[in-house]
Amino acid sequence: VSANMFRAVVRLSASGARSLTRSRTSISAPLASRCYSHGKVETDEEFDSRWVTYFSKPDIDAWELRKGMNTLIGYDLVPEPKILDSALKACRRLDDLASAIRILEAVKEKAGPHKDIYPYLIQELQPTLTELGISTPEELGIDR
Amino acid sequence: MLRLPSVRLGGLVVRRASAALSSPVRMASHEVSQTVDMSQPMYWDRVDTPLPDRRYKDILTDSEKSLKQKEKGPWAQLSKEEKIALYRMSFLQTFPEMKQRSDEWKTVMGGIFIFLGFTGLLVWWQRIHVYPQRPHTFDPEWQEKQLQRMLDMRISPVEGISSKWDYEKGQWK
């Protein structure tokens, strides 16, 4: 399963006038643009890299982590693995394992009825999870 | 610890906030319940706010404190139980626990039906003991005579009842 295919899946919103969300018709089609009266549309890549940068701040503090995660969870999308990777590493810098596990729970929740998103995310994050020693909720048995 | 009433939002999110404690207040001879200091960061379990403003357990025992120290090292060295303990120090409920359905709806529906039933009994009693007798003007014989009188008086002859009666043939049109 290519990463590209899931880019369409991880963006949950199919329609709506929210400026941050957009729909992709197919993998190779050009980005569907919306007719705004003014203002630049942020691409998916820009959105992702903005958030990766946010969590990559070396001296990120606990408040910024919480604020970032709560805001990110508030969006109508499941965050890309690279954003979550950055967030988990931020948890490591803050010595906060509980928040790392909580983040995994939260993105599983965000996927909603799409049951194949969370396993994909775990698969993509496995290197980081192993490297940092983060157990998934399933491994700890707290996913029931 | 004072628990604020849980509010159901869309059936999925259960919000129960617990806040920093203040000591119970005693006034005269009775005890007022503990007050919640809402100016302090509060803890809550919400699906849409995974990381609340503060950790669940503020005050840690010594063993918990030492576990927190161990957390500063490599996490791979922590056992499963230690990881779960760290999670529970920071959070009260896991996501599945938060989203648990309860049987409260059965109580609510049961209560509704009980009260509806009771109201029905009241209405029935009222019909028997409060309402006056059925007026004699509702009897079929009276109604016939009434209708005949209305037709004789040519009530509503343009578009109403008398216009529907064929006076020559003595029947409805």
Image: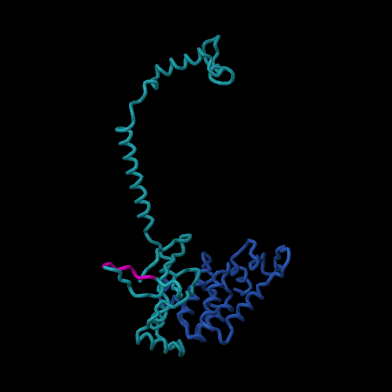
Chain colours: A blue, B cyan
Image coordinates of residue B122 in percent, x first then y, are: 32, 40
Looking at this rendering, what residue extends furthest in the front direction? B28
Indicate the quadrant where residue B37 lies: bottom left
Indicate the quadrant where residue A31 lies: bottom right
Residue B44 versus residue A56: which sits nearer the camera? B44
Image coordinates of residue A52 in percent, x first then y, are: 60, 80
Residue B140 versus residue B31: which sits nearer the camera? B31
Residue B170 to residue A112: above or below? above
Looking at this rendering, what residue extends furthest in the bottom direction? B73
Q: Write the residue at 50% across / 76% down.
A: A103
Q: Is residue B114 magenta?
A: no
Q: Write the residue at 41% across / 63% down.
A: B6
Q: Which range of residues does the magenta coloring cover? A: B29-35
Image coordinates of residue A92 in percent, x first then y, are: 50, 85
Total labels: the figure holds 0
Does B162 sit left or right of B99 as displayed?
right
Residue A127 visible in the picture: no
Residue B15 visible in the picture: yes
Image coordinates of residue B82 in percent, x first then y, are: 39, 83
Residue A29 versus residue B27: which sits nearer the camera? B27
Of the 4 image quadrants, the one containing the C terminus of chain B is top right
Indicate the quadrant where residue B8 lies: bottom left
Looking at this rendering, what residue extends furthest in the top direction? B168
Residue A3 versus residue A68: which sits nearer the camera? A68
Of the 4 image quadrants, the one containing the N terminus of chain B is bottom left
Q: Is residue B33 magenta?
A: yes
Residue A14 to residue A133: above or below? above
Looking at this rendering, what residue extends furthest in the left direction? B29
Does B97 sit left or right of A55 as displayed?
left
